[in-house]
Each structure stands twice: as structure tokens, then as C-alpha cells.
Image (cartoon, rainbow, N blue to C red):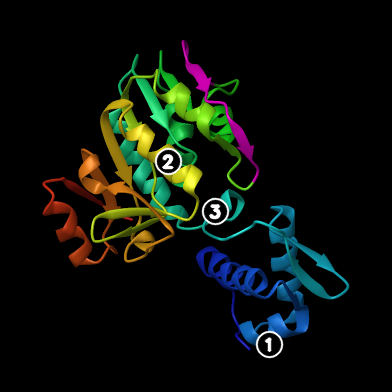
Amino acid sequence: MRHGRATEAEVEQRRRQLLAQVVAEGSVRIETLAENLRVSTMTVHRDLDSLESRQLLRKQRGMAVALPNITIETATRFREYSELEAKEAFAEVLVRHVAPGQTVLMDCGSTLFPLARRLAAVEQLTVITNSLRIAGMVGGPESAPGTRVMLLGGVYRGDFEACAGSDTLRQLSRIRADVMFSSATAVQDGRLYHPDQAWADLKEAMQTAARRRVLPVDHSKFGRTATHRYGDVADYDLVVTDAGTPQEEIQAIEARDVPVEIVTV
């Protein structure tokens, strides 16, 4: 059993492993989780309390029980706490691509949450998003003068805390933004993938709704695929990533004449 205080990143990684096992098996005894993770049952209880508070699983009668339709890839409530340092570093770079008075289009990726908080300080900005979380971050009581938030409607999905579907796509077809920020779930050899068809369609539609398109994606998303392919990095004007991204993946992007900005985390 491990001794010493774990870092925040290590705690979240352990919780990710825990959640993955529960999602895969449907239900797991708390003692089994402690044994597999080589931690105390008290630590597992704390982890489960955190995951339950984010509505990612349930604790019942000494068991951790998975919720229906929850996956690590899609659950915003989990992804929000992963790669926190990278997301903050990305936001410092991304906000430089926005000027007062512009119209900004954003999807619901948790990678964009730190950016949304910074955009709230940019004056006369119009932000269009399908994400209830991002709408609240940008349009809060401390927002800069002239801030306007437009929320794309459609079918609401609790695991994404956002909307998608035919109504959302119809609204996007009537929008033209100055800059668009869209995160990615999986990237391999320059191709983009998502496990949910509705969100793959949404991200593809967003590519055509903006003059400039920026793709922030941390190293953990590379070398992976998912069920639905929705495009290529060539559909973007800039890819922002960190130094942990495999060199062959960066070369695949640059081979498509797309600039890559490496962020120091």
C-alpha cells in the first residue's frame, strides 16, 4: 500500500482508474477497488464520495455502482478535473486569439473552461456556445461591459451538460463567428474522432461557421480513435498542444500545412 501524500494529478488519475473499472464492470465492491488500487478503503471511500458528488457513480451497500450512459470519454463532470495545468496553460495562449468586439464560437469541451473564464473579462464580446457551463462562465455577474452570450439549443445531454442534434446544427448554419475553439476527444495521424455521433456532427458543423478555427488538444488525446470520425486537423488554422504530444503526431499535423503551437505546462 502506498504511503505519502499524493498530488492532485495523482488523485485524479487514481479516480479515473477507479471509475473506469466501475464503468466496465457495472458494480465493484469497495474492498476490491482498494485492493486493485493498493490504497486503503478509507481512500476509496473519499474517491467515491468525490465521484458521486459529480454524479458519475453511486455508492450503495459497500459497492460502487455505475450510472447508465456514463463513459470517461464523454462525462464532462470527470474530464473537467483532468490535465488541469495543461488547460490553464492553453487558456493563456488561446485568449490571445480573441479581440474585443469579436464573435467567438465554442463547444462544450472541458478544455475550454479556463478560456471561458478569461473571456468573461474581454469587453464587447459575443460568445456562442452549446454548453450551459461555458455560457454561465462567460455571462456571469462579473462579466466585462457589453458581453453577450448566445446559447445554442437542441437536445440536452446531462453527461455533456450541453445541447446537440438537428436543431443545434440548424442554428449553426445561420451563424458566422470570427474565431472558433473546439476541443477534441481523440486524434490519430491528423484525423479526429468522437465516441458520440451527435457530437461528431456538431464539431464538424462548427468548422464551417467561423473565419478562424483553433483546435486545443493535450497530449493525452493523441494516438487514440473513437467510433465516429468527423474530420481532419486540416480543417483548422491552428493546433495548440503541449510538449507531451508524440513527435509523429505533430509531424502528421504539420504535413497538412497546419501550424502547431507548443504550450509549456
Mark 2 to mark 1 CA distance (whole Å): 41 Å
Name the disc covering residue 35, or none: 1
Q: Residue at x 46, y 24 (%)?
A: 170
**What range is drawn magenta here?**
143-158
- Name the residue type under label 3: Thr
Q: What is the quadrant of the C terminus in the image?
A: bottom left
- Name the residue type under label 2: Asp
Name the disc covering residue 113, or none: none
Q: Residues within 10 Å of mark 2 (few under 14, many from 20)?
A: many
Q: What is the quadrant of the N terminus in the image?
A: bottom right
- x and y, in percent, of residue 222 in the image: 33, 62
Residue at the spot of label 2: 201
- x and y, in percent, of residue 184 in the image: 39, 50
Q: Secondary structure at mark 3?
A: loop
- x and y, in percent, of residue 91 in the image: 38, 41
Name the disc covering residue 74, or none: 3
Q: Is residue 43 visible?
A: yes
Q: Secondary structure at mark 2?
A: helix
Q: Quadrant of residue 45?
A: bottom right
Q: Is residue 147 magenta?
A: yes
Q: Residues within 10 Å of mark 3 (few under 14, many from 20)?
A: some
Tell me the mark number nearer the camera, choosing from 2 and 1.
Answer: 2
**Residue that extends furthest to the right in the rendered view of this protein:** 61
Of residues 208 and 124, which is closer to you in this image? 208
**Residue that extends furthest to the top in the rendered view of this protein:** 146
**Is 192 positioned to the left or the right of 2 in the image?**
left
Q: Residues within 10 Å of mark 1 (few under 14, many from 20)?
A: few
Mark 3 to mark 1 CA distance (whole Å): 27 Å
